[in-house]
Amino acid sequence: MTMVWITALGVGGATMIGALLGLIFKKLTHRFSDIVLSFAAGIMLAAAVLGLILPSIEYGGGKSGLLITVAGILAGAVCLNMMDRFVPHLHKLAGVDTENHPDSGQVSRVLLFVLAIAIHNLPEGV
């Protein structure tokens, strides 16, 4: 039980520190914002793989665990895609219809990175 409290205090404290930094530094460069968001995405990707996907495969046991995990990931991707399409975006509500992305080739690199992690973490021989 002590470990739960320590974890809760650590997570809550990190959230408070992040919120205070956001209140103090209101004018951030676009580059710094991208760096911070990339770091957060990496942390969330690691948490998803290590904390959710691998235990899901282990608990399912064998090929059925892998199939159930893949089906769950695909169902989640479909739900996120539908939400992205049907929920109004804030930039469109604010009157800014276009987003400027200077390097459109970056998307393929990100997808390759995610694919490499997924392939690397699949158990061999299943």
Image (cartoon, rainbow, N blue to C red):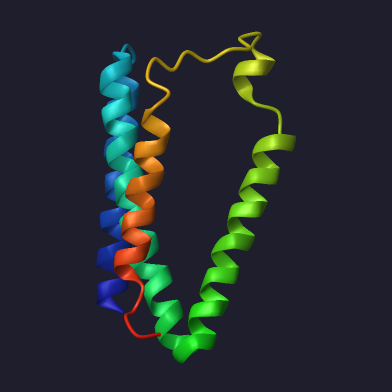
Q: Is residue 97 above or below residue 45?
A: above
| Residue 99 vs residue 8, the one in the foreground | 99
List x then y, in percent, for residue 64: 54, 87
Q: Is residue 99 above or below residue 115?
A: above
Residue at 68% x, 16% y: name it.
93
Question: How many circles with numbers are drawn on the protein?
Answer: 0
For this orientation, the residue located farthest to the bottom is: 61
Q: Which quadrant holds residue 125?
A: bottom left
Any part of residue 123 in sight = yes
List x then y, in percent, for residue 41: 35, 43
Q: Is residue 88 above or below residue 44?
A: above
List x then y, in percent, for residue 107: 42, 34
Q: Which quadrant holds residue 40?
A: top left
Residue at 32% x, 58% y: name it.
117
Q: Which quadrant holds residue 48?
A: bottom left
Residue at 26% x, 76% y: name it.
2
For this orientation, the residue located farthest to the front is: 125
Any part of residue 61 in sight = no
Image quarter where the N terminus lies is bottom left
Left or right for 73, reference 111: right
Residue at 37% x, 20% y: name it.
103
List x then y, in percent, for residue 81: 64, 44
Left or right for 40, reference 101: left
| Residue 43 vs residue 25, the one in the foreground | 43
| Residue 117 vs residue 54, the one in the foreground | 117
| Residue 69 vs residue 83, the one in the foreground | 69
